[in-house]
Image (spheres, grey):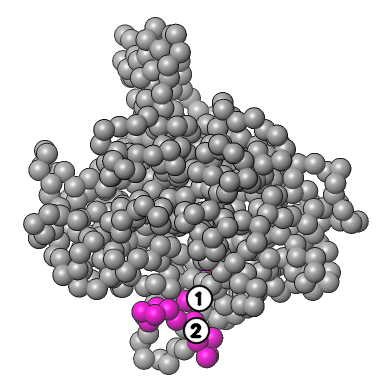
Amino acid sequence: GMCSGHGTCETVKEIAARDFSNIYKLWDEDSTMGCVCDAGYSGADCSERVCKFGADPLYYDDEQNIRFSNFTYHFYTTAADVTLTGNYSLTFFDAYGENWQTAPLDWNATCETVTAALEDLPNNAIPVNSVRCFKSDATNDGHTDGQDSTVEPIYDANMYVHSKYTLAFPENPGKLSQIVINKYLDGTRPTLYSDESTSTLGWHIYPNGFIGENVDLVPDLCEDVTVTLNIDSTNNVHYLGGLDTATTKLLKKCLGDSNGDSSDNTDVYDWDYGDDVNPHLIKLVDATQDTSIATTDYDGDTDVDYSLSKYPISRLCAKSDGEGRTAANGFPVDGYGIYLCANRNPPGFYAVVYWDNTDEVFRMYTRAAKDYSSTTKFYVFTTTGYLQLVNTESAAFTTDALTDSSTEKIARYYSNIVHLTNSSTAVSGYTGTLDCETTTVDGTTALDCLDKDDYVMIISTQGTYNAADLAANPVYPNLYQVKRIGRQPKTAEGLSGLLYEHDIEAYRNQVVLDYSMNTNFMFNGGKANAADTSASFYKFYPPATNKQYAYAGECSHRGLCNTKTGLCQCFPGYSTDNCGEVNALSN
């Protein structure tokens, strides 16, 4: 049958619309056809079965860990003293894009209930005893804002958070689509609602710097180097500490080129300092997982407590039990009595750094130092890829201080849509656009351009760095991919269903990302205004294919997929249904 009975035949226009609502308007939009395969099938005619996904067991070791998907979601209202009632479901997407919907969940369900619902999905979509869940203690029934201003990626006193969860899926490797919340479990009637006459109920979902991946683009361990994360309060910037003369030299050599042009490298280390045009991208992995340098866990032992692996973040221990655990005796604690310590196998996170040659220190544009002790050690991974500022005059923002109401700002938080405008009047008539179709790269202000599927980071640098810029940058930055870019048409309703007067040029220029943003960049007149925290797009040029590590895929890259049966044929020495285990007895 058509598409082998395992897919649908669609026009190229329809296929484009499936992909983040892209628009295809060429002459063959209604004549060129192709198969869209059901999950589990592939090939031009959807005749081939896919095999089970897994992570290469030779990838992770004492220093390197798998980056697995980690999503946070919360329910909020914009009014106080509101009560929520009802339930919702979560939709989980596996590595092949198949969607799995959980049983109904109460809006204030326990982590145990949420975890059970996910692990009860059919076909072993999520392995039993694998989901990590943390429910925030800061939230309550909407009588206060329900947020901890010291840890929220975006804090807004006008947003009343009722329940908040962080979920991680360490045994579902690979790049997974963002989870989805469904509150319509009874046809068109919502099953989750508030007691307001006009409901202000909403929710946000975002990955907080930890996204699953199929390919490691920052794979190179800087051997014999560990760093700490520190805060320079005088210069309002974070920096890498724990380095002496010898390890500083080693790190410089590991970082190497930062702009894709080795001819301008400097020093005997053959490297670039990095700057606000071409900073260095690194990955940091908490080294307290390594018992050879771990200090103490929350029980006071010199080894790491393996039970902590049930939590989705690397520093979470347990609540105080009256044993006098305080920061003074080595047990940092957050505002809710949760103590922080080592965890086995934490995923790495990205940081963006440059060398300050005046103070001779590696400074950071990102803010992970706020979450760790200044003595916590990290392994450093580097890349032969590089970051490139796209345009010096483009301001990327998610909210507008000059036009957005409080409710509109909250609705725009944690969105995957980034808006563009000009950050100054230096280029007459410029509207902030970055797409390669309309941009002429001039090497002066337009340093590069963006196409669909480009890798990007979004960081507030703006040349003269200040405290507002630093506070706007994410603690743990995400590496995104561009899924749609262009100038949106005007609509009678206004973009995103918001006010018509916001259907203006700045909001029409959009970049749609594959995941939601975990910070808020606010436009406030442009970079000349110190209160403006709009950001810049940085295009990431990945390393050459032979410098990458593709570690998540069919049969864990340690076997061959039989496309007729959908079963893995493991190489000698590997076993299980996805070839994800080393087994000396297997042949």
261 to 26, vertically: above or below: below
Q: Magenta segment range?
A: 327-344
| Residue 189, x across and y down, in percent | 10, 43
Q: Nearer the viewer, residue 460 or 567?
A: 460
Residue drawn at (61%, 77%) of the image:
233
Binning the other alpha carbons within 10 Å of mark 2 as few (below 14), some (14 to 19) or many (20 upward) gives many
Quadrant of the snapshot with the N terminus: top left
Cα–Cα gap, marks 1 and 2: 7 Å
Residue beneath disc 1? 341
Q: Nearer the viewer, residue 578 or 437?
A: 437
Dominant SS of magenta comes to loop
Q: Residue at x 34, y 43 (%)?
A: 502
Name the residue carrying label 2.
331
> Mark 1 or mark 2: which comes first in sequence?
2
Can the viewer see residue 500? yes
Q: Is residue 65 visible?
A: no
Q: Vertical placement of 33 versus 114: above or below? A: above
Please give the name of the residue rendered at 47% of the width and 76% of the height, measured from the top-left corner. Answer: 340
